[in-house]
Amino acid sequence: MSVTATLNGSARGSGFLIAPAGSANFPVPLTLKTNDGSKFVAELAVSPSGAGVKIEPSVINVGPDETPVTVCAVSPSFKKDDTVISITRDGALLESINITSIERPRLAFDGRFEVRFATNSDPYNHPRGGGVGWMWSLEGEPDFVPADSVPDRIEKPVGRVIKFHGPGVDRPHVPAIGVFVREVIGHVGGGEVGFQTGDPAIGMPVNLGPHSYFASNLPVSAADRTAGRLPEEQHPDGTQPIGNFELHIGTSFSGSSRVGPHVPGTTESSNPRNPDFRPRAGGLVALSRQEALVYPFPSLSEFETQRLGALLPDFVALKKNGETNTPEFRNLRTRIGHLLPGIASQQQQQLLAEHSDVGLVRLGRSAGFAWGNREIYRGLVNDRLLVSKDVPGVIDYFSRFESLHFMCVFFNFHTDEARAHCYGALDPASPPQTLDEKPLQEVIASRRT
C-alpha cells in the first residue's frame, strides 16, 4: 500500500507554508490518494517541534481519488524542514512531509528576452536600424516601430517592445526566449531559503506589457525636430525607465506603475510626470562575480566565434547549391559580416578571400559594452493591480498588498540574436537584492541546493 501526498501542487515529500502576516493566514491544500485502489482512514499530525501548523480535518477517509485537507501555518519556522507532517494508519507511518514555514516570500524569475530598436547615433525611432547604429534588421523582419512612433505622450504605444514571450523575429541558430518564475524565496530563522517547487506560481510565465519598451528616446531625427515631433520624455542611455510598464505573472497577477497626469507642453523631459513609479535603470555596470557564477557566459569573442561556426555551414551549403540570390542567403551573409570583426584576424581574412565573390564583407560589430554588462531596473507595481485570490500560496499572499517592489536585471545583449538575458524578483515587503548584493558564499550555497 502506498499513499501520494501533494502539498499545494508539490508531491516530493517536502514543501513550504507561508507564516501569518498580521491577522492574515495563508491556507493551502494537501491532497491524499492511494495508488493501489485501497480505502482506509488516515490520521495526520504535526511534529511538536518547529513551526505551528494546523490541519483541518486531521482524520480523513483516503482512497484512489484525491481527498483534500487544509494546511495552514500559525507560526514561522526556525530553520528549513524543521516541521514534519506525518500520515499514519492505525499508528503505522505511511508518509511524511518536511515543512518550512516562511515569512516575507518573494518570487524570483529569469530567462531570455527579445528587444529590437535603433541604437547609437541612429534616431531612436528609426524603423530598421543599420545606419550608423549597431542594431540592424534583416530582410523579411518587421520594422522596429509603427508609422506613428513619436511618444509625445508616455502612454502611447511606439513599438520597440521588450518581449519575454512571443518573439517578433526568429532567426536561425538563436535560442528561444522565455521568462518564468523559477523560485520562491522566504525568510527563515534570520536567513533566506529558496524553493523551486511547492507553489502554483513556480513555472508561471512572466511577461511585461504588450507595449513596454526602454524609453530613452535619444537621439531625435532632424526631420522630427524640424516638424516639432518631440517625445514627452528623454533619458541618457542606461538611465531610462520602462515605458508603458506592466507586469504579468501567468493569468494570476498583473499590475503597472502609477504615474501622474500629463503636463501640456512637456517635451524631452527627464521627469515628465509626478509621481512616477515606473522601473528605471541605474546605469550600465559590469556583471558581478556572483552573477557570472549563476549565469556563466563565454567572452564576447568566444560567443561570436561559436555563432559563426553555427552559421557558416548553412551559408556554404546555400552557396554550393547556387541559392545566393535568396533572402536566406543574404541574411546569413549580413549576420556573418557583423560577426567577422570579433573573430581571429587570420580566419577573417580567409573567409573574406573565400567568399568575396558572393559579396561577403566585414560589417560593424555588436556593441562590446552590451556584453558582460547589465542594467538594473527598480520600481513599484502599484497601479491597476489584478491578483487572483483563489491561487493558494504566494499569489494569495501578494493579493493582500497594494504595492510591490519590482527589480529586473537585463544583461548580455547581442545584435545577432536581438536577444539577451534577465533575472529579477517581485517582493511586497522590500526592494529585492541583486545577486551581487548577496555575499558570495550565499550564492555558492544556493547553487548547491
Image (cartoon, helix red, strand yellow):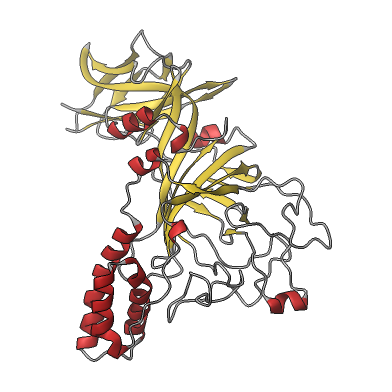
Residue 392 visible in the picture: no
Most foreground residue, 306 or 422: 306
Is 259 above or below relative to 392? below
Residue 194 seen by the camera: yes
Q: Pick the quarter of the image with the N terminus.
A: top left
Q: Residue furthest top?
A: 48
Q: Which residue is more in the foreground, 289 or 274?
A: 289
**Quick check: 9 above or below 144?**
above
Q: Nearer the viewer, residue 348 or 418?
A: 348
Q: Is residue 129 above or below residue 274?
A: below
Q: Position of residue 225 (x, y in %)?
A: 74, 74
Position of residue 7 measured from the top left corner of the image (x, y, whole percent):
35, 30
- Marker count (numbered): 0
Residue 347 x/y as whole percent: 24, 72
Identify the image quadrant of residue 224: bottom right
Q: Quadrant of the C terminus?
A: top left
What residue do we see at 21% from left, 75% from top?
Answer: 313
**Residue 151: image x %, image y %?**
69, 66
